Image: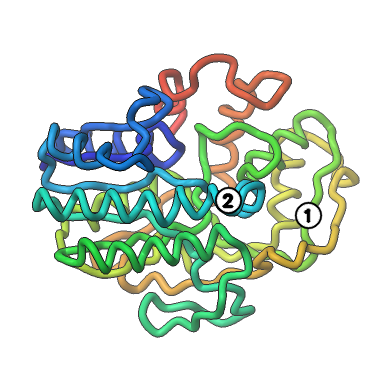
Amino acid sequence: MRVLVTGYRGFIGQHLTRELEEHDHTVYGIDMLTDPTDDLRLPGVAERVVEAWLPDCVVHLAAKVGRLFGEDNPAETIADNACMTALVAKAAANCGARLVYASTSEVYGDNGDRECDEVEGPFVLPHNIYGLSKYWGEHVCQLYAPRDLAILRFSMPYGPGLPAGRGRAAIVNMLWQAERRATIPVHLGAERSWCWIGDTVRAARLVIEDWKAGVYNVGRDDAAVLMRRVAGIACELTDAPYSLIKEIRAPSNQTVVKRLSTKRIRRLGWAPEVELEEGMERTLEWVRTLGDDGLPREDWWRRSAHELA
């Protein structure tokens, strides 16, 4: 299959590209980090790229990701996650390519302890612009590229390839903080089911290969853990004292508990393979390659992130 991946230099993008290539798919990547002229927010760019490669499938990962980064500039977040998606969806449909859209579990909003199904929900208004803009992105995909459309609601992927710092994945930050004997903030009562990035992209590949339209939660429903325990594992792996852990109240636009149904993705034969402790130990190898500023010492998409996975 010929697959065009937007945002291929991002965290999920680099791992998904490798996953697809290892299963004999031809992958073409586009990312502004590679070529600033490939700005999919600009009229005509998406059409030019899709027409140049004529893919069977367009996997649209390019986006503004995360609650904190989303709130930095709400207008830019909407442009990245809704307006750009509309242009990509139209371009894919015009060339007869199937669209696979990367969404997020944040579209469900905060439903407390209730499990969220792809169709039945429950849905409440997302309480941050990131979740809302990705939900709008789902709707523009349904409007412009409904044929064989697949929507992937990613939830809590982690692993090598992410820097540490503000707005980054909690597991990477906790390992980074524990390694440097810094305070590890933990939101009171926060609970997550983390999914190893290799398991995440394998699930995405199964959806891409299945070629059926639908919405899929891509994550885990069988490994709920309090974030205080995740911080504890970070301390254990780095021999750091538990006294570094400091529980704080979650901000008002933070979803404290996430529980998702994964029945649909499991029907494709998917099951997670890497448990949290093993995955965090692998991720620590990556964290130890980061510089003092939390950033990779060299262009991380070229280096050992794939090897560490």
Which image quarter: residue 238?
top right
Q: Position of residue 155 (x, y in %)?
A: 49, 59
Q: Is residue 174 left or right of residue 195?
A: right
Residue at image point 74% right, 49% down: 231
Q: Earlier in the sequence, mark 2 or mark 1?
A: 2
Secondary structure under tag 2 reads loop
Q: Position of residue 175 (x, y in %)?
A: 69, 37
Gap in angstroms between the C-alphas marked 2 and 1 = 17 Å
> Which marked residue is nearer to the observer: mark 2 or mark 1?
2
Q: Is residue 90 left or right of residue 178?
A: left
Crowdedness of circle 2 by 10 Å Cα count: few (<14), some, many (20+)?
A: some
* Residue 19 position (above or below residue 259): above
Q: Is residue 25 left or right of residue 271?
A: left
Q: Is residue 83 left or right of residue 64?
A: left
Residue at image point 38% right, 75% down: 118
What's the mark number on residue 66? 2
Residue under label 1: 186
Residue at image point 60% right, 20% down: 289
Amino acid bearing label 1 = Val
Front position in the image: 31 or 298: 31
Secondary structure under tag 1 reads strand
* Residue 46 position (above or below residue 161): below
